[in-house]
Amino acid sequence: MTKNFENYVLPTYARQNINFVAGKNAVLIDSEGKEYIDFAAGIAVCSVGHANERLTKAICDQVSKVIHVSNLYYIEPQAECARRIVEMSGYDMKCFFGNSGAEANEGAIKIARKYGEVDGQPKRYKIITLDHSFHGRTITALKATGQESMHNYFGPFPDGFVYAKNIDEIESLIDEHTVAVMIELVQGEGGVQPQDRAKVQALSAMLKSRDVLLMVDEVQTGIYRTGEFLASNLYGIEPDVITLAKGLGGGVPIGVVMTGKKDIFSPGDHGSTFGGNYLSTAAANEVLDILEEMKESGALDEHLLYFETSLAKFAKAHPAIFLEHVGLGMMRGLRVVDGDTLGKIINAAREAGVIVLKAGRNTLRFLPPLTITKSDIDEGFARLEKAMAAL
Ligand SMILES: *Cc1c(COP(=O)(O)O)cnc(C)c1O
């Protein structure tokens, strides 16, 4: 298998030599039969765990009838998914469906660019994003990403992206061409860094007063990752545009851009062949059912708290290595004393049978399935202790 990767797959990822062949909730099993506790969930994707029985059944039921028809026809689960997302968000919005986070953000950028086009007035097209942000890998989403090193080789890029050092700097960068600001409420890839709630609320009010759109990239933070359905709910703001993807399909590719500018697009303005098809929206509807029930029963909040407490205890036991505990809900990080040590911890953890991630330069990142049980949380941290002892 690794030969096929070497010979036939472009080497865009630094892959670890593990071949997972099965899983059950927060447990993954490799081809040698070794079990791992999964504290990564495919980077916040497998929100209801692996081989979830309800999700498996919903997908199988759907694909045994129809997987895909084009968006030239009505697709009932797509409309149902849109209704659920809008109602669960509490925002008066409409949805467009694509297949990934980057594609959702492309949709957000197109909404902003069209919003900035008003007859007889100079076009507003500039979008302000933040340093250390991550918005995806397509040319435009990459340009929106505030990490210059990722822009090497791929220019020329579309114009009109401006980077602010932080939220405080945004207002000073607004000019007559600015149409939108796009932010993550917790920077995921950038280092699991939550924004300050009061500053975000002040930003939201300031942008509203200046008719500049607030677009929140919830590709990673959305779908209960921070404890509320959307991080925007947790922060108490009403964005103009929100994007979703990772956790929504439980592993089936899906992306959404939703906006309160409900009349922004006309037929022909935007599209996506696979977007919102039967397979992805039937999966998303089941994921939404499962997680909404967990939230309403109190189980989700209980799991979140248990994970946070366990992580805090683990960090405290190694004060010379973990400098800071960051994040919200089941999107957590520990700042490690240096990048070298972080790499060693991730490898030792894998040896000990637990999957963890890196973010930014020196953050050990945790994104477990939202359905992880207390006993798997305990087992995961017990194995991490073993990993630390082996360093
Ligand atoms: C992962 C991620 C993206 C990109 O999503 P893809 O599905 O890989 O295109 C965009 N924004 C944020 C915040 C992300 O975490």
Image: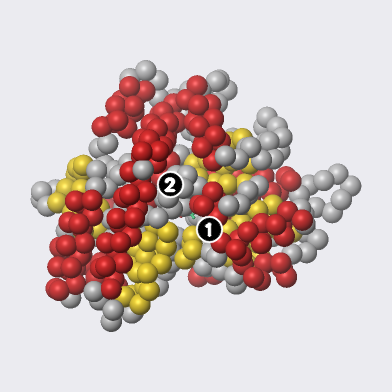
When the figure is inspected, residue 65 is found, relative to residue 264, above or below; the finding is above
Residue sitting farthest toward the top: 65
Q: Report which residue position mark 1 lands on.
A: 185
Q: Is residue 194 left or right of residue 72?
A: left
Q: Amino acid at mark 2?
A: Tyr
Q: Report which residue position mark 2 lands on.
A: 224
- Where residue 80 appears, as percent x and y from the top left, is 50, 26
Q: Which quadrant would residue 297 be assigned to in this image?
A: top left
Any atom of ligand 1 within 8 Å of the CB at mark 2? no
Q: Nearer the viewer, residue 154 or 68?
A: 68
- Where residue 299 appears, as percent x and y from the top left, is 33, 43
Residue 272 seen: no
Any atom of ligand 1 within 8 Å of the CB at mark 1? no
Residue 356 seen: yes
Q: Amino acid at mark 1?
A: Leu
Q: Is residue 323 left or right of residue 237?
A: left
- Of labels 2 and 1, earlier in sequence is 1
Q: Nearer the viewer, residue 338 or 233?
A: 233
Q: Secondary structure at mark 1?
A: loop
Identify the residue at image location x=46%, y=48%.
228
Q: Is residue 291 left or right of residue 117?
A: left
Q: Which quadrant would residue 65 be assigned to in this image?
A: top left
- Where residue 154 appears, as percent x and y from the top left, is 54, 62
Q: Which quadrant would residue 16 be assigned to in this image?
A: bottom left
Q: Secondary structure at mark 2?
A: loop
User: What is the spatial separation of the Cα atoms under label 2 and label 1, in whole angstroms?
Assistant: 13 Å
Identify the residue at image location x=29%, y=71%.
315
